Amino acid sequence: MRKLNLTKALLALWILGLVFTAAGCGDDDPESSLEGSWRFSSWTVDGLSVPASEWYEDGAARVEVTLNANGTWSANDFDADGQVIDSDGGTYTATAENLTLLGDGDELIFIWSITGDTLSLSMTEDGHLAVLSWTRL
């Protein structure tokens, strides 16, 4: 009888170990959670909401960015009819806190976080905090 209780206890500990091991096996690569396509949705500067139209250039009605698994990114600006009116691209790297975009000789460094399907990119420029929100497509 005692051997059976010890076997059950060891089996329970083994199962518990598997549960904790599986729970800890998430993808620790920050780039993998960033991978995919994102649509610009809103932004704030110093906590104040700014109309999206002030961020768009050249008559764009929406902007979408794709972050690829190979460390490249591409962006498309679309007009109201859904036609691409401008494109850009480059490479990116990510850490658990920072997203660095390189393209056309420019380097942009953001602090990033994801909540649900929303990617928030924050940066300070000229003493102002800008937060851009993107929705996963």
Image (cartoon, helix red, strand yellow):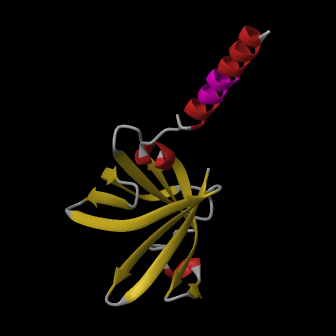
Which quarter shows the N terminus?
A: top right
Identify the main secondary structure in magenta. helix
Rendered location of residue 105, percent (x, y): 19, 62
Q: Is residue 8 left or right of residue 93?
A: right
Tell me which segment is drawn in magenta: 12-18
Is 135 rendered above or below residue 16?
below
On screen, 51 above or below 5? below
Tell me if residue 14 is in the magenta stretch. yes
Residue furthest to the front? 2
Number of numbered discs present?
A: 0
Residue at the image position 68 percent from the left and 17 percent from the top: 11
Residue 15 painted magenta: yes
Q: Nearer the viewer, residue 50 or 20?
A: 20
Q: Residue furthest right?
A: 1
State left or right for residue 105 relative to residue 98. Answer: left
- Residue name at image x 46 percent, y 42 percent: 32
Q: Position of residue 102 (x, y in %)?
A: 27, 58
* Residue at 32% from the left image edge and 66% from the top image edge: 109
The x, y position of residue 92, in whole percent, is 32, 52
Between 58 and 134, the one lying in front of the other is 134
Is residue 34 depicted above or below 45 in this figure?
A: above
Horizontal relation, residue 100 to residue 56: left or right: left
Q: Nearer the viewer, residue 129 or 54?
A: 129
Q: In the figure, residue 107 lies in which quadrant? A: bottom left
Q: Against 107, is 67 above or below?
A: above
Q: Residue at x 31, y 67 (%)?
A: 108
- Tell which residue pokes out farthest to the left in this image: 105
Query: Residue 48 at what x, y percent from top left?
Result: 57, 89
In the figure, residue 130 lies in which quadrant? bottom left
